[in-house]
Image (cartoon, grey):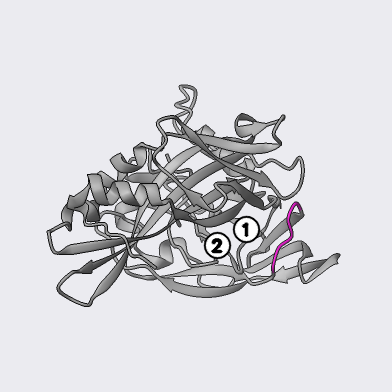
Amino acid sequence: MPIFQIYFTMKKLNTIFLMAVMFSMMVFSSCETDVDIYAEGNETTIVYGYLDVDADTNFLKITKSFVGNAIETAPIYSASNYDYKLDVQLRGRFADNPNVVSVAAFDTISVYKPYDSNSIFYSGRNQVLYYTTRKLKENEEYQLTIKRNDGVELTSKVKTISGSSIRKPTYSISFESPVSNSIDWRPNTTGELAAYYEVVGYFHYKQFLQNGTDTTRHTMKWVMGSGTGEQLWSSSDKWLSIRYTPKDFYNRLQADDNIVNNSPDFVGRIVEGFEIVVTSTGEELYNYILIQNSGSAIQDTPEYTNIENGMGILSSRSQCRKLVEVSDLTINTLERDYPQWGFIRIYK
């Protein structure tokens, strides 16, 4: 199961958490629509985001609590957003001047998410995000400070995660082995393990009409495994690994929506490669997910936050990617054993 509920994605930019405190990252739990987080009149600032050393830009979603029916109130911009720009700063060492502790001031940007009838948050309105383009350092502690106009100041401290390098597979990947195989990687800084890791594979292919010229690109996503750093670390090999069953590749491709719904006789497909993405996340986010899914009988809504004078989560993450070729054996299998999918070999 994915460890993040993704709200908005930009290439080489940070991923942003959902705007409302009681529902963000809670895709696997049910929620009531009546929300009364705090007593009316006691405004609480809500912060969600993480610091990503691999991102060109880091974003924060900063909103405020509201009282009322979530379905009716959440789409109202003024209910959960401030009508002025908050003073948001991040203090630490940055890549452009790694020997000096300095401050990065966050600016604001307005992004648009189209209306989605299946989500109370995608209301078709602009949302304000706070961002900085200062490049972060690995394994560095940063302090976030947020100042409101009424004098309330919020703070939080987070240590960034070390980046990683994927060792295996090296150049290509094959899905013909009858036994399990592994994805291996190692953090760039020795001994700096993240709290939690998730490995996702993306099978990329091109699709075209054999009697036409239009070509489209498609991707089949495969969550290959996950676990804590301690669970995945091999002290003898000095690598982190997850095991997967190669033959599962064909079962997952057979369930792919595009393959299932768009495979007439005149459609052809060409394999483009297999991309491996290893995402590591900080202890704060991992603890938040554990607590929110603990099923505690002591309290109805467990609360976890590392925001002083506010609520929410500030954590860290890192991602490493590797694009490898799909082996000739696998391409032969796709062409020979699954002709209904239309994969063909292109000889160079």
Residue stretch in magenta: 135-139
Which residue is at the front of the view, 258 or 286?
258
Give the Cα distance between marks 1 and 2.
6 Å
Q: Which of the two discs, 1 and 2, labels the residue nearer the N terminus?
A: 2
What mark, if any, has residue 202 been given in the picture?
none
**Can residue 164 be seen here?**
yes
Q: Work out which residue is located at the far right of the displayed protein and give it.
A: 99
Q: Could you tell me which residue is drawn at 67 percent across and 53 percent down?
A: 163
What mark, if any, has residue 14 been given in the picture?
2
Magenta stretch mostly in which secondary structure?
loop
Task: Point out residue 247 in the picture as x, y percentages from the top left corner.
Answer: 36, 37
Which quadrant would the N terminus be assigned to in this image?
Answer: top left
- In the image, is 233 to the left or to the right of 137? left
Q: Could you tell me which residue is drawn at 81 percent across and 68 percent down?
A: 102
Magenta residue check for 71: no
Q: Quadrant of residue 75?
A: bottom left
Residue type highlighted by circle 1:
Asp
Task: Point out residue 171 in the picture as x, y percentages from the top left corner.
Answer: 54, 53
Which quadrant would the C terminus be assigned to in this image?
Answer: bottom left
Q: Quadrant of residue 97?
A: bottom right
**Can residue 4 be seen here?**
no
Secondary structure category for the residue under label 1: strand
What mark, if any, has residue 52 been given in the picture?
1
Tell me whether circle 1 and circle 2 mark residues in contact (CB < 8 Å): yes
Which residue is at the front of the view, 26 or 64?
26
Q: Could you tell me which residue is drawn at 23 percent across and 53 percent down?
A: 259
Q: Could you tell me which residue is drawn at 32 percent across and 50 percent down?
A: 332
Crowding at label 1, few (<14), some or many (≥20) Cα neighbours within 10 Å?
many
Q: Work out which residue is located at the far bottom of the displayed protein and give it.
A: 213
- In the image, is 72 to the left or to the right of 180? left
Task: Point out residue 290 in the picture as x, y percentages from the top left corner.
Answer: 53, 33
